[in-house]
Amino acid sequence: MEDLTINEIGDILRLLKLEEYVEIFKENHVDGAILTSLERDDLVNELGMKKLPATRLFMYMTASHISK
């Protein structure tokens, strides 16, 4: 995860059906290194994600979980 580019993070957001957050991640230059340094609350408070989408992204980051 740490080596992912900003565009690859966008691809992951789309994969997780979180495309509404792609632009905000790009605007804030969130790449893999930055994303892996964030906590779930940072996703909510700093990037404006709702709790459930933030949890889905966090679960993907930590356990490669994709909702079925």
Image: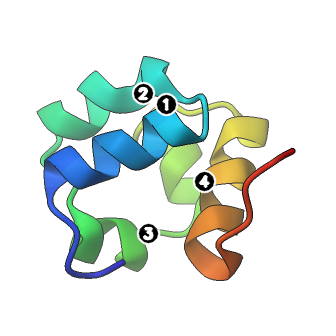
| Horizontal relation, residue 9 to residue 55: left or right | left
Residue 67 versus residue 31: which sits nearer the camera? 67
| Horizontal relation, residue 52 to residue 20: left or right | right
CA distance for labels 3 and 4: 11 Å
Compared to residue 39, the image places residue 47 above or below, namely above
CA distance for labels 2 and 1: 9 Å
Provide the secondary structure element on which disc 1 rests: loop
Compared to residue 8, the image places residue 17 above or below, namely above
Which callout, 3 or 4, points to the residue nearer the camera?
A: 4
N-terminal of the pair, mark 3 or mark 4, is 3
* Residue 38: image tag: 3
Q: Quadrant of residue 19?
A: top left
Identify the residue shown where x is 55% and y is 30%. Answer: 18
Provide the secondary structure element on which disc 2 rests: helix
Identify the residue shown where x is 60% and y is 29%. Answer: 17
Residue 65 coordinates in the image, percent (x, y) = 74, 65
Provide the secondary structure element on which disc 4 rests: helix
Residue denoted by label 4 = 57
Amino acid, disc 4 = Leu
Provide the secondary structure element on which disc 3 rests: loop
N-terminal of the pair, mark 1 or mark 4, is 1
Label 3–label 2 contact, CB within 8 A: no
N-terminal of the pair, mark 2 or mark 1, is 2
Name the quarter where the N terminus is drawn: bottom left
Number of residues whose C-alpha sits closer than 10 Å to that of mark 4, classed few (under 14), some (14–19) or many (20 or more): many
Amino acid, disc 1 = Gly
N-terminal of the pair, mark 4 or mark 2, is 2
Residue denoted by label 2 = 21
* Residue 48: image tag: 1
* Residue 62: image tag: none
